[in-house]
Image: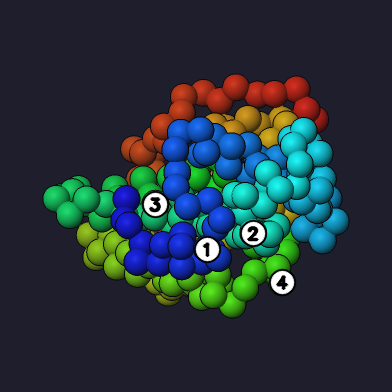
Amino acid sequence: MVRSRTSSSAISPKRRQQSATPGTDAKRERILQVAERLFAAQGYAHTTLAQVACELGVSKPFVYYYFQNKQEIFETLSWRAAVACFTTMDFCPDDTRPAHVKVTEGLDRLIRATIAHYPAAFFGYREPQVYRPEYLAAQKQLANHFYDRLCPLLEQGRRDGKFDFNETRITALAACSLPGFLYAWYRPDGRLNADAMARELTQLAWRVIGLIDNESFSVKTANPQRQDAADVG
């Protein structure tokens, strides 16, 4: 994976916690997990650090030791998801596999990363007004990094006779919008589990890019297990 030139320190204010240890990392992670659940359930505006502290069974100063405010927590959760998703088209320089293999694998990784980082991966779609301009600029740079790698691979795959599409950028955006709009309807407890959902969406993304001989490819999971909920999402 690439190490983005825009680091987490560039998108977050300076934390009061100055050094990281296994213990402090675990405590930060607890705060992030609780805050993520509250943001998802009741939105950014209706979530307070007092609620986060109450859920954790700690005082507000405990939370403030690790994060200056709830916006930093929100951006930290969102940035972690963004990095996981927008670096899925990064391959080692010595990876000599054909372009179409990298694209199909990268799209599968993108979809799986989006699902794995539910619900934080969808915060940007739900409440884009929350972010600072610096954060939005960093995320745009990261997205450009992703498409700067995907588009040449798509074009090479088309020249190799493996893809059938017209407009490169439109095709790339359309394929990647499939996991992006999960935020409108996805439910982790739905009829399809995470692996099954990733498999379905990956197959659809391959169709968008016009993958030829789709049957010769397979995604990582075998026959997906189905859950009991009535609807797909």
Write the residue at 26% across / 55% down. Answer: 99
> Which class describes the residues within 10 Å of circle 1: few (<14), some (14-19), or many (20+)?
few
Q: Distance between the residues labelled 1 and 3?
A: 28 Å
The reply to whether residue 162 is in sight is: no
Q: Residues within 10 Å of mark 2 (few under 14, many from 20)?
A: some
69 and 37: which one is in front? Answer: 69
What is the spatial separation of the Cα atoms under label 4 and label 3, in whole angstroms?
26 Å
Task: Give the mark nearest the N terminus, 4 or 1.
Answer: 1
State if disc 1 and disc 4 touch (CB < 8 Å).
Answer: no
Residue 68: give its label: 2
- Assign a secondary structure to mark 1: loop
Q: For numbered disc 4, what is the local secondary structure?
A: helix
Horizontal relation, residue 181 to residue 7: left or right: right
The mark nearer the N terminus, 2 or 4, is 2
Q: Residue at x 67, y 52 (%)?
A: 64
Q: Nearer the viewer, mark 1 or mark 3?
A: 1
Residue count near mark 3 (Cα–Cα under 10 Å), binned few <14, some 14–19, many ≥20: many
Q: Residue type at mark 2?
A: Gln
- Single out the mark in the foreground, 2 or 3: 2
Real-space CA distance between mark 2 and mark 3, rounded to the nearest whole angstrom: 30 Å
Residue under the point 71% across and 40% down = 34
In the rendered structure, which amino acid carries the disc numbered 1? Lys
Residue position marked by numbered label 1 in the rendering: 14
| Label disc, if present, on residue 88 of the rendered structure | 3
